[in-house]
Image (spheres, rainbow, N blue to C red):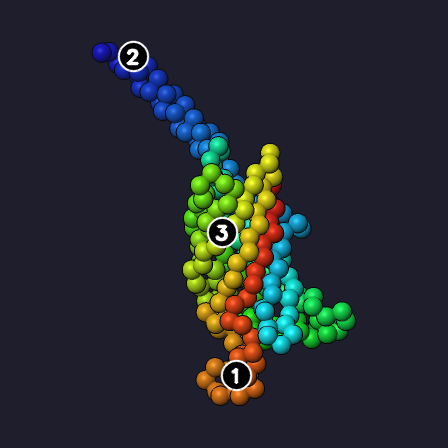
Amino acid sequence: MNRFAASNLFNMLKKITLILVLASFQISAFAQQTYHLDIKKSKILWNNRKTMGGHYGYILFNSGTLNYPAGDDPKDGIFSIDMNSMRSTDHTEQAQNEKVDQELRKDGYFSIDKYPTATMIVKQITRIGKSSIYKVSGDLTIKGITNFIDFTATIKKTGDVITATAQLEIDRLKWHIDMQTNPKSWDPFAALADHVISDKILVSLNLVFGK
């Protein structure tokens, strides 16, 4: 093969390689799409199931994404939760709700000034049978403490909109939500309050995603 023919062959191979690389990027982009959480339409509802009264309310999100392969089931995602948005809604008087909100900000509860953001990294989403119910698992970080959680969620895709709803419980003690500002000291009043509250916090998720 002469030098001219070799040069033409080399240029042809470069073009073919470039076409294949571009095609692979296009296939990859088509194969997996990222849906973004609509933070105006999505929220977390919480209820601490306290045996004497109780508080409940909501938390909003900073952001969230869900990876959804085209023609397949959702795969994984990541969510940033705005702890500063946590509000109680169980009292009819706003002043009473604000008093509860201030308590929730303290170190014995959610240490919001120190940890203004919580995160949920969804590592696996698995469809249960042929239903729209999925098992979701991943790592939830609150107060800088990370624990594995799993739960079931109903996930539906209609056109370019995805909705997800779920009911789950988290064990507050795993994230040191124990009403004791300084766990090294013995606080009988905090300990008493801790015993009249269920260890489980009920959480409801109402999520909406779009492209």
Q: Which residue is mark 1?
A: 191
Tell me if I can see residue 206 in this picture.
yes
Residue for point 57% across, 65% down: 116
Q: Where is residue 171 drawn, in percent x and y? A: 49, 67
Percent position (x, y) of residue 5? Answer: 28, 12
Q: Position of residue 184 (x, y in %)?
A: 45, 84
Q: CA distance from mark 1 to mark 2?
A: 87 Å
Q: Position of residue 121 (x, y in %)?
A: 47, 54
Q: Is residue 192 left or right of residue 97?
A: left
Q: Residue at x 56, y 41 (%)?
A: 156
Q: Indicate the amino acid at tag 1.
A: Ala
Q: Which mark is residue 158?
A: none
Q: Are marks 3 and 1 in contact (CB under 8 Å)?
A: no
Q: Quadrant of residue 100?
A: bottom right
Label 3, residues with CA under 10 Å away: few <14, some 14-19, many ≥20: some
> Would you place residue 122 above or below residue 114 in this image?
above
At 69% from the left and 68% from the top, the residue drawn is 90
| Image mark for residue 152 | 3
Mark 3 vs mark 2: which is more N-terminal?
Answer: 2
Residue 211 visible to an observer of this rendering: no
Looking at the image, is 43 positioned above or below residue 83? above
Callout 2 crowding tier (Cα within 10 Å): few <14, some 14–19, many ≥20: few
Q: Is residue 127 above or below residue 104?
A: above
Q: Label 3 sits on what residue type? A: Thr
Q: Nearer the viewer, mark 1 or mark 2?
A: 1
Label 1 element class: helix
Name the mark nearer the viewer: 3 or 2. Answer: 3
Q: Secondary structure at mark 2?
A: helix
Viewer-side residue, 113 vs 21: 113
The residue carrying mark 2 is 4
